[in-house]
Image (cartoon, rainbow, N blue to C red):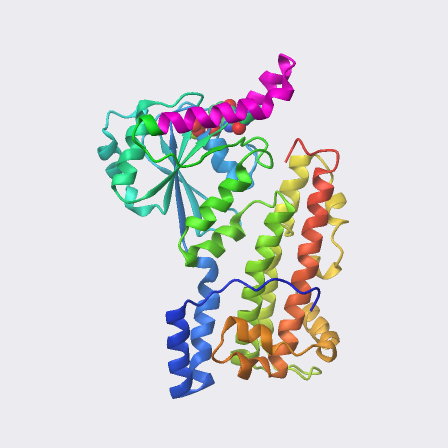
Amino acid sequence: MGQSQSKPNRFFNDEEIKMIAQVYNQEGLDAVLPLIKDKCDNLDNEKVTIAVTGESGVGKSAFINAMRGLGPNDEGAAEEGIIEQTSKPTPYQHPTLPSVCLWDLPGIGTTRFSARQYLDKVNFNTYDLFVLITGERFKENDVKLAKEIKKMGKEFYFVRSKMDTVEVNLNEVGQHDRLEEVFDEIRMYYNRSLKESGLPTSQVFLVSSRYPHRYDFMEFFGCLESELPDKKKNVFVLSLPNLTEAVIEKKKKVLRAKVLLAAVVSGGIGAIPIPGVSVACDIGILVVTLLHMRSYLGLDDESLCRLACRVNKPVQELKAEITSPFVLNITPSSVIKLLTSTVSGAAMIADEALLLIPVIGSVIGATVSFTATCFLLNSALNDFAKSALNVLKKAIEDNSEVL
Ligand SMILES: Nc1nc2c(ncn2[C@@H]2O[C@H](COP(=O)(O)OP(=O)(O)O)[C@@H](O)[C@H]2O)c(=O)[nH]1
Ligand SMILES: [Mg+2]
């Protein structure tokens, strides 16, 4: 099962565990498995809805693209550099996780509304959180809006975009060594302005949508993740662009828990005998799980082509970094073939199941179908994550400016 990893994420909260225990004690395993299947099916459908607002030209569209790992010319990208004509919110779905949606809310300055009216107009209640993008200076509208959002009991985050231009300007005057100092001054300016306006001095994130791997984007992701409700965290993590090794590791952790659930469901509910293999499981569930895993780690054809285009390399060069040929050929027959070769090597992993579903973990963890499918999925996950990292390294090799 590869190297030992940290505990997987928890998908069941204490209440759900209690409920599962009750059902299990009263009605047995068969009654519990559909509950686990529901959970497994719903993991990726959990909605995460993020509102992005700010005055025209501050970089909302570019930010929405960067959050979805898209460049300005990719299909589905928000158009950058156009003057806003409307105050109507526009939704932008994530390319691989449609349940994650960023909404472009044109700046309050383009309307005649008060902050309150504006929030009503844009249906503020439908968003999990608000990102307020600011330009070089804080505007009165930003403050009014933030106060109103706070009053409504929602969270907001200030983001100062286009920080790469600050760096370019410093370079031009030969003062690159002052970069950190200038960034600190900008942070202080925002904190002071927030304080003077009576707003909490929450962190202001200094980012560049053109170079999202630089500056505060990673901290920003971490902050959003920590503030989202538990059930939304996992889907949010899976939606992050593969910008760093840390992101790939985070995704791997979420997927590890998903693997356990899929193995329980496939080995438990499916339990369809497969000719020639001494394991009964639902191959369909395994194939779907593997396909999802592949696209969340950016290894599907579409994501690879997008990345190749972005870093100006032939897609074959990126594909050559994929260590396991299985990644590029996930079909029922390739999965059965792999299952045949892994059955004998499957280790007992009851502990893993126990971590995920304490009540019935020991029962499920001891079944051959569970151990074999879990072993297969976990090995594939390790391979996929390794390939994703290789692809990332190749993409940014002598090209770190582009991603
Ligand atoms: N250098 C740089 N340019 C950016 C960045 N974000 C946006 N821009 C550019 O600034 C202009 C306005 O950005 P846009 O996203 O359209 O702003 P919006 O009106 O708030 O949606 C466009 O030409 C973008 O390409 C950034 O982080 N760095
Ligand atoms: Mg725009």
Queried whether the magenta region covers residue 352, the answer comes back as: no
Which one is in front, 37 or 234?
Answer: 234
Q: Is residue 58 above or below residue 74?
A: above
Q: Is residue 299 above or below residue 190?
A: below
Q: Is residue 59 left or right of residue 176?
A: left
Queried whether the magenta region covers residue 184, the answer comes back as: yes
Q: Residue at x 76, y 44 (%)?
A: 317
Segment colored magenta: 165-194
Occupied quadrant, residue 6: bottom right
Q: Is residue 19 left or right of residue 235?
A: left
Q: Residue at x 52, y 62 (%)?
A: 9
Q: Residue at x 62, y 46 (%)?
A: 303
Q: Is residue 384 left or right of residue 138?
A: right
Q: Quadrant of the C terminus?
A: top right
Q: How many marks?
A: 0
Q: Quadrant of the N terminus?
A: bottom right
Which one is in front, 76 or 125?
Answer: 125
Residue 388 is situated, as x and y percent measured from the top left of the image, at 67, 51
Farthest top residue?
173
Which one is in front, 77 or 6?
Answer: 6
Q: Residue at x 75, y 45 (%)?
A: 316
User: Mostly what secondary structure, the magenta segment?
Assistant: helix
Q: Is residue 35 above or below residue 125?
A: below
Q: Is residue 165 visible?
A: no
Residue 169 is situated, as x and y percent measured from the top left of the image, at 58, 16
Residue 50 is situated, as x and y percent measured from the top left of the image, at 40, 43
Residue 123 is situated, as x and y percent measured from the top left of the image, at 28, 42
Q: Is residue 115 visible?
A: yes
